[in-house]
Amino acid sequence: FISPLFSEESVERELRAIDSEHLNSFTSESWRNYQLLKSTCDQSHPFSKFGCGNYNTLTDGGNVTGTDAVSSGGSSPVPALKEFWNEKYVAENMKVCVFGRASLDELQKEVEKSFSGVKSNGIAFMPKE
């Protein structure tokens, strides 16, 4: 969570899981209704844009039948994932909602312990006292 590895192997496994979910979605009535809604909305609105990837689109032409993205004619998304994470995965872009039976002070301590390692984009995060 705080410092992902983005190893080629784990990204490859996730790409294959995404591709499988994508293939299975075609038989879902709710997915078809969602696609119909997207196709009939204002085409200048971001909602109308492509919102679901598969192995081929996420690897710029890779084929899921290969051993990995590069050997199957595509490219690895790992560099782009790392760039996205470094640029966007900062405290200022996040919100956290906590629910628990512990006191507010105890919950705050747990949140600070769990999320203090999330980097900042230069604006220091200072918990309110």
Image: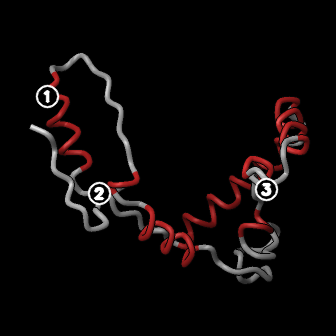
Mark on residue 118? 2
Residue 69, image quadrant? bottom right
| As drawn, 60 above or below 111 | below
Question: Cβ–Cβ below 8 Å for labels 3 and 2?
Answer: no
Mark on residue 106? 1
Residue 121, image quadrant? bottom left
Q: Position of residue 60 (x, y in %)?
A: 76, 76
Residue 67 in the figure: left or right of residue 88: right
| Rendered residue at 54%/69% (across/down) | 81
Outermost residue on the top side: it is: 101
Q: Nearer the viewer, mark 1 or mark 3?
A: 3
Q: Position of residue 96 (x, y in %)?
A: 35, 38
Question: Cβ–Cβ below 8 Å for labels 2 and 1?
Answer: no
> Disc 3 and disc 2: Cα gap in Å?
30 Å
User: What scheme was used to colour the molecule?
Assistant: secondary structure
Q: Of helix, strand and loop, which one carries label 3?
A: loop
Q: Of helix, strand and loop, which one carries label 2?
A: loop
> Disc 2 and disc 1: Cα gap in Å?
20 Å
Q: Quadrant of the C terminus?
A: top left
Mark on residue 50? 3
Q: Nearer the viewer, mark 3 or mark 2?
A: 3
